[in-house]
Amino acid sequence: MNCRVCGADGVRPFLDLGKTPLSDGLVRPEKLDGPEPRFALDVAFCPSCKMVQILEDVAQELLFPEDYPYFSSFSDHLLAHSRRHATNLVETRGLGAANFVVELASNDGYLLHNFVDAGVPVLGIDPAPAQVQAANDKGVRSICRFFGIELAEELLAAGEPQADVIIANNVCAHVPDLNGFVAGMKRLLAPGGLITIENPYVRDLIDHCEFDTIYHEHLFYHSCTGIAGLMERHGLHLNHVEYFADLHGGTLRYHVSHDSGRSAELERYLAEEQKIGLDTFRYYEGFAHRVEHLKTELLALLRGLREGGHTIAAYGAAAKGSTMLNYVGIDRDLVSFVVDRNVHKQGLHMPGTHQPILPVEALVEQRPDYTLILAWNFKDEIMRQQAAYTEAGGRWIVPVPKPEVVNP
Ligand code: DWN
Ligand code: ZN
């Protein structure tokens, strides 16, 4: 088992989530009785470059098919976060018509439209056709491609300028050739330019038992230590880091450039990661036991409610929700349906466990006694939005960090 990033052997597995369907592989009704591919899902730690990674390779075409269902614009919280980020960059870097901002994995233009509104030229790059179409429809110039060093060279050869800002949110977990991806960023970044990279923080995954954020789309689980080493190997430098506790269960935004120099905040994070041993296998080796305990607790809670005659639904046909349902073994008898605001997901079924995905109105219409929040990273926004369900007596269950019934 060689490391995907540094090539060293001796990568050490610490969690096996079993044969798992693809988390965004939502099932069409007519395909429910058909074959559904499942793949092993093992997570490991590289003692050399400290990168946490999964061991299985699933073809990108399978992970990101033509009908890839994830659209970023279905979360008000994420849209507000993105707007703040764009506005801050425009103001602090004085961006205008003479500048150029590129987003890698730009989805449906959820973030870049803020730069367009500010008169800053942009280019969105994303491999999902429907999302790219949605971005172009809203005036965000986007191309449907996977990014890497080849595309960076192609863009420059075609006359595109180097970028003053490159944004890469929730994509550096997804790219098999992470080295080619970073080399492409190095090539595309203008002198004095800035790269900002957002990813869920592997420390929160372990500390808050967020095992459901592990799925085949997410090849890597990042830390300051891992990112710093990765960037140095490509002539880039990690300069600063910001933390957002309320995004995707805990997100770090890494600031990277051609120039060296580390902020006090980054030095603090690096020292803390070393102090808690996040750069050693010891930090991960007890995690599987904690995940197994959460599974047992959640199943007991759900089975107890069902044996008491209560009905249970779920909220959020999220990729993490698929890992949660399949690993814990939450079938349609325990949870009868899932609701989701994303119209592209409604009418389909959850991977593996096959609960139907309904519009969110079904919560008030069908009034299940309890609703398990699979998209727990947005639980506050969701419970606020579904106040009518709560007022009608509906109760909420949050699965991580500890399965419990919560009152908004
Ligand atoms: O890298 C990724 C992570 C960071 O986010 C991608 N795999 C895409 C995504 O993963 P996910 O599918 O687990 O993401 P979300 O954004 O946590 O999924 C939320 C789901 O809940 C979406 O299907 C949209 C839905 N939703 C909703 O129905 N009502 C979300 C909100 C906020 C709502 O109010
Ligand atoms: Zn490595």
Image: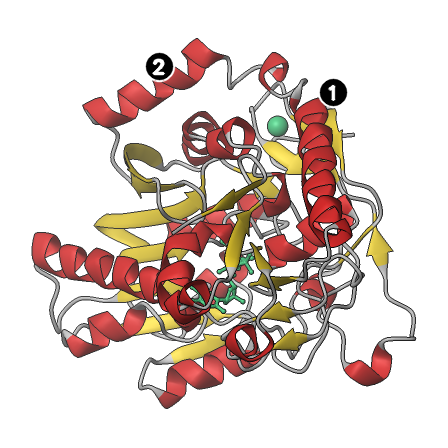
- Image-quadrant location for residue 244: top left
Question: What residue is rendered at 46% in x and 63% in y?
Answer: 105
Is residue 115 visible in the rendered structure shown here?
A: yes
Q: Amino acid at mark 2?
A: Ala
Q: CA distance from mark 1 to mark 2?
A: 25 Å
Question: What residue is rendered at 50% in x and 65% in y?
Answer: 151
Question: What residue is rendered at 92% in x and 75% in y?
Answer: 33
**Viewer-nearest of discs 1 and 2:** 2
Q: Amino acid at mark 1?
A: Gly
Residue bearing mark 1? 10
Q: Position of residue 349 (x, y in %)?
A: 72, 73
- The circle on residue 271 is 2
Residue pushed farthest bottom?
Answer: 137
Nearest the viewer among 90 and 393 is: 393
Q: Position of residue 225 (x, y in %)?
A: 44, 25
Badge 1 vs badge 2, beta-carbon distance below 8 Å: no
Is residue 262 visible in the rendered structure shown here?
A: no
